[in-house]
Image (tube, rainbow, N blue to C red):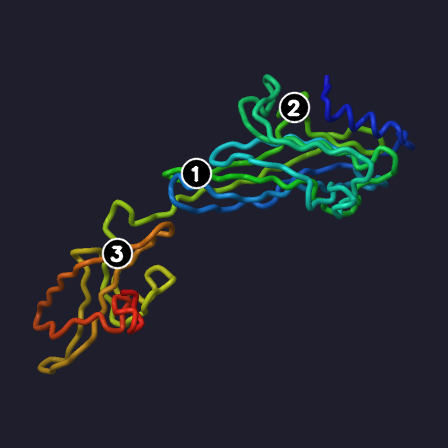
Amino acid sequence: MRSLVFRGVILTGLLVLGAGTASAQPTFDLAIGGGGDVAGNPDSAHSIELTCTMSQGGDAAGGAQGWSISLAAEGCVAITGITTDGTTAADVSQGGLRNTGFEKSETTTEAGAGSPCDGLEGAVSAVVLSFVQPITLPADSVNEIAKVAVEATIPAEGGAGTVSYADGCKGAGQPVENTVTWNGQTVDPSFSSATINCIAAVTCEGASPNLIFQAESIGQAAELNAGMLTGTVDDDASLSVEVPTGGIGAVDVFAAIVSNNTGGDGVQGWSLSVAANGGVNVVGATTDGTSSADVSQGGLR
């Protein structure tokens, strides 16, 4: 038996308007937009926003009069808030369609025993667009019905999280099911979930930064390895210089420290020891024209 406070309010309000003429029920699909990749240092937390939408299929006239949704989070994400603000479910005074209706949205930590939400935290939302006016969602549109605040915490090895429609999440009232009310009738919707990939950024923390040589200066490059002629690391960093037989040539070689640490600070200082072999002599060294130059000369020092 589906007995819940939110749904009871929806049906009570809509019965005041009458069920109307019976016709073939439309289909409704609940989706969640805004998933994707979230990258950061291990254990860092990142706030993202997801959007719950409802679309309608079939030839039946009229749109949804009300609905209840139940959402659960798993993996590296947690739901921290839910609201109808900024959606079609908002009050008419805030740009939405709801007028003399009902709305209740809240996060949850409990669920009905044995329900799909059992053991998970989530959020619920219930909406009646109007108790006294024939207000419905547009039947030919994808309608935003809720905004969900989500916090993604990056695991050390990375991972994935999902936010999905799951019957049974429980707020202050009874466990809530995902249902839509149309023409005074209850319709079970189809639904899809959102996946968030929590990507642990590779950093130089706890390991030596990459030390490379290159044949031209690229300053501070935003793209990792941009312009590099060799990608060898630390003691093995090297660059070969070709000189015609019997000839004498000169070339500038640039030493570069490469860090892909996307969070926190980079290196603060360094010392380099460079050797030459095979008939090549080091004739000079300078930090002029590099990031190591004095700030008065365009560097960072």
Chain-order first, disc 1 or disc 2: 1
- Residue nearest the observer in this picture, 244 or 182: 182
Q: Is residue 277 above or below residue 206?
A: below
> Which kind of residue does numbered mark 3 sit on?
Gln
Total numbered labels placed on residues in the image: 3
Q: Is residue 300 above or below residue 141?
A: below
> What residue did someone put label 1 on?
159
Q: Residue at x 73, y 22 (%)?
A: 5
Q: Going by the image, does 197 lie left or right of 140? A: left
> What residue did someone put label 2 on?
172
Q: Is residue 86 above or below residue 234?
A: above
**Among all residues in the image, which is located at the extreme right?**
21
* Res. 268 mark: 3
Q: Is residue 50 above or below residue 242?
A: above
Q: Residue at x 25, y 71 (%)?
A: 215
Q: Name the element at disc 3.
A: loop
- Residue nearest the observer in this picture, 88 or 199: 88
> Which kind of residue does numbered mark 2 sit on?
Ala
